[in-house]
Image (tube, grey):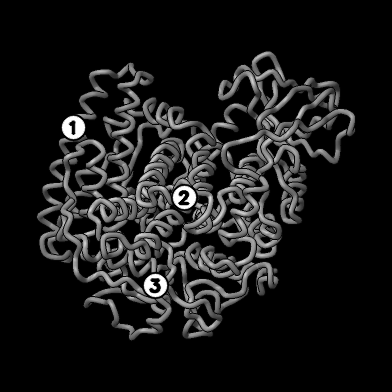
């Protein structure tokens, strides 16, 4: 990238912290008050919540990337002729903005238990900040672990993804505590009987934690070697075995336990510690970890623990299939840990680059620093394009999660690791300190985020899942006629996904040779080029045409490698092909995100320079000599500086001129 720094980016002064709305987050932190209006679902019970600016013209929406100072705009603002401006974002965005405002600005030392100051101080004691768990409970986060049909607020995985992102940009540790619980309770929602669902739902809504007892010290991911056994004796199960390491094992009330129930059968068993004889179970000491200090990572041991036989979740002997399907959901949700971490470290890097002066000016003007920050920001935008559609997939097309969840679980955490490392370069020596910049929280974020590539199958496990399906994807199945509508449901941010009605039968172990994102590249690229010729900024269509050609060549090379090595799904070469397929998936996801949102969002989003830059950035992974188009950087840098100065999420929405007051109801969407 050219070292030239455009003249137009303005370095906004840091907003003053006040209750008047000048700050992008609420000035009332969770330690000071109980969040009003959260005893019930705000989306259903609070009409004003549909539009955060309805009662207060200065109301702000941190998740939207739109400055509150813009205020209500005329209906024509940011709208070209024929544009449909009265469209609302899916509820996930508003819910996330509500949480973000409630938790406060982590850069503000007075923002209670979710300030970076409090988080780092607690980290030094291997603790979660006092009051942090109470704060998220008071807001209602545990309700997003329970489906709405059982009294919770979990309507779509997209909503849980966004609130997890909001917590993760402050504390990955707190997010992981609840993520471990999500993994444990999902089998109950998917296959449990009425008693199991009701009991667990009531417990979680009251604040009880759950854990997923699958891992064993000697077997790791080799679940077929599990030594835990549940012996069936009449109408009872007698459970013996040790599960380690397990998140929430000590604090958790419920243990969804993977155990042998026959010579070749494994089952998932709902264990409620309150039902057991205290002498028949015990917890293991906490495990010391590099990151996630304060998280309950320990183990649980059962020794002849007796419980009713009907505590088996679903059909006996189906535990392996249930586990594999359950992981599809949490693999997708884990991407929120990475996106939240990326947002945090890019913000820290941008703040530091604005404030640190060397050689007579701020260090953002040093070409290599600017290069790291711009690329990190592009990587975050790419992560949004990849993760959000797959989060929607749970209720739009659950049968596709077997492939797409592994793509997301591999690609987004790896992207997150690279962004964290890049910002470490920006901070240089300051990034190594446990004090100073943002109270030294960078080193905590760096250590905590490392878990994202390990949870729910390591990077290599997920690449192997992708590699195993590639031979069946290179010859597309006959189209059903619903492909275009499916992609619109996945990628259009103004569509609300269907509500989740948990049913394990809707999840599949493979995609059965279908990948509507990866297999329709030719059609999608034609649509993108046609739209770019008509609506994009000057020069964008020409750049996209060249990029489509390069991407097409890369696709052909990968397909050729798959055909030539059809039986090879586990070698290093096979995993490399899987990596490239994931990168192609990301490229097509960026294209589809632009295609399905450009008309409503308008502005720099529709002009498409960001799309060119994201595709070039992705192409650099396979072709490192690819150069970012310097002339297309100004609108992206404008968005970076606005998001930094106004304390908004870094998001594609920051490229849209539409204020929250225009993102209102359009039920005909």
Residue 270 versus residue 318 in the image, above or below = below
Provide the residue designation for mark 1.
556
10 Å neighbourhood of mark 3: few (<14), some, or many (≥20)?
many
> Which secondary structure lies at badge 3?
loop
CB atoms at circles 2 and 3 under 8 Å apart?
no
Provide the residue designation for mark 2.
391
Q: Which mark is residue 413?
A: none
> Which secondary structure lies at badge 2?
helix
Residue at 38%, 48% (x, y): give it: 428
Quadrant position of the C terminus in the picture: bottom left
Residue at 59%, 46% (x, y): give it: 176
Residue at 21%, 35% (x, y): give it: 555
Q: Which mark is residue 66?
A: 3
Q: Nearer the viewer, residue 371 or 557?
A: 371
Q: Judge left or right: residue 228 versus residue 165.
A: right
Question: Residue 11, image x and y in percent?
Answer: 32, 71
């Amino acid at each position: 990238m050219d070292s030239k720094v455009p003249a137009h980016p303005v370095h906004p002064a840091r907003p003053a912290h006040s209750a008047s709305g000048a700050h992008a987050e609420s000035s009332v932190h969770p330690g000071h008050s109980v969040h009003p209006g959260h005893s019930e679902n705000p989306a259903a019970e609070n009409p004003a919540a549909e539009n955060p600016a309805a009662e207060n013209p200065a109301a702000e929406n941190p998740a939207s990337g739109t400055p509150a100072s813009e205020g209500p705009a005329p209906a024509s603002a940011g709208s070209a002729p024929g544009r449909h401006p009265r469209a609302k974002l899916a509820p996930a965005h508003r819910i996330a903005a509500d949480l973000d405002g409630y938790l406060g600005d982590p850069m503000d030392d007075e923002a209670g238990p979710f300030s970076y100051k409090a988080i780092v101080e607690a980290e030094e004691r291997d603790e979660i900040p006092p009051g942090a768990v109470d704060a998220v409970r008071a807001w209602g986060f545990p309700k997003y672990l329970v489906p709405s049909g059982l009294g919770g607020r979990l309507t779509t995985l997209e909503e849980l993804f966004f609130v997890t992102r909001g917590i993760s940009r402050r504390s990955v540790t707190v997010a992981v505590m609840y993520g471990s619980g999500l993994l444990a309770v999902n089998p109950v929602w998917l296959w449990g009987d009425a008693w199991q669902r009701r009991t667990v739902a009531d417990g979680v809504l009251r604040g009880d934690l759950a854990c997923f007892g699958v891992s064993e010290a000697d077997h790791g991911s080799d679940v077929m070697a599990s030594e835990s056994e549940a012996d069936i004796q009449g109408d009872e199960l007698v459970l013996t075995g040790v599960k380690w390491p397990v998140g929430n094992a000590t604090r958790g009330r419920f243990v969804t336990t993977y155990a042998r129930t026959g010579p070749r059968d494994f089952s998932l068993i709902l264990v409620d510690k309150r039902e057991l004889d205290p002498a028949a179970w015990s917890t293991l000491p906490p495990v010391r970890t590099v990151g996630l200090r304060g998280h309950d990572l320990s183990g649980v041991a059962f020794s002849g623990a007796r419980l009713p036989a009907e505590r088996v979740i679903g059909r006996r002997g189906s535990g392996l299939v249930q586990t594999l399907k359950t992981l599809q959901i949490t693999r997708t949700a884990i991407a929120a840990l990475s996106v939240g971490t990326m947002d945090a470290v890019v913000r820290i890097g941008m703040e530091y680059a604005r404030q640190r002066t060397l050689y007579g000016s701020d260090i953002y003007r040093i070409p290599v620093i600017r290069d790291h920050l711009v690329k990190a920001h592009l990587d975050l935008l790419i992560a949004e394009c990849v993760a959000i559609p797959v989060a929607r997939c749970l209720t739009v097309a659950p049968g596709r999660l077997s492939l797409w969840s592994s793509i997301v679980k591999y690609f987004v955490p790896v992207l997150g690791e690279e962004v964290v490392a890049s910002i470490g370069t920006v901070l240089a020596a300051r990034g190594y300190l446990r004090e100073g910049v943002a109270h030294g929280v960078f080193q905590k974020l760096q250590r905590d985020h490392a878990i994202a590539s390990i949870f729910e199958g390591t990077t290599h496990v997920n690449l192997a899942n992708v590699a195993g399906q590639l031979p069946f994807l290179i010859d597309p199945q006959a189209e059903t006629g619903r492909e275009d509508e499916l992609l619109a449901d996945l990628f259009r941010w103004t569509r609300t996904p269907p509500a989740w009605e948990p049913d394990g039968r809707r999840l599949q172990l493979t995609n059965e040779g279908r990948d509507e994102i990866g297999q329709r590249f030719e059609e999608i690229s034609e649509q993108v080029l046609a739209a770019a010729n008509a609506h994009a900024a000057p020069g964008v269509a020409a750049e996209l045409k060249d990029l489509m050609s390069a991407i097409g060549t890369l696709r052909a090379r990968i397909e050729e490698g798959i055909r030539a090595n059809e039986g090879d799904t586990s070698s290093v070469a096979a995993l490399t092909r899987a990596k490239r397929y994931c990168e192609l998936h990301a490229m097509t996801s960026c294209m589809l995100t632009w295609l399905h949102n450009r008309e409503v969002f308008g502005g720099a989003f529709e002009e498409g320079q960001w799309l060119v830059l994201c595709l070039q950035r992705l192409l650099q992974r396979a072709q490192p000599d690819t150069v970012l188009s310097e002339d297309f950087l100004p609108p992206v840098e404008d968005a970076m500086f606005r998001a930094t100065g106004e304390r908004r999420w870094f998001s594609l929405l920051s490229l849209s001129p539409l204020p929250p007051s225009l993102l209102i109801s359009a039920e005909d969407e």
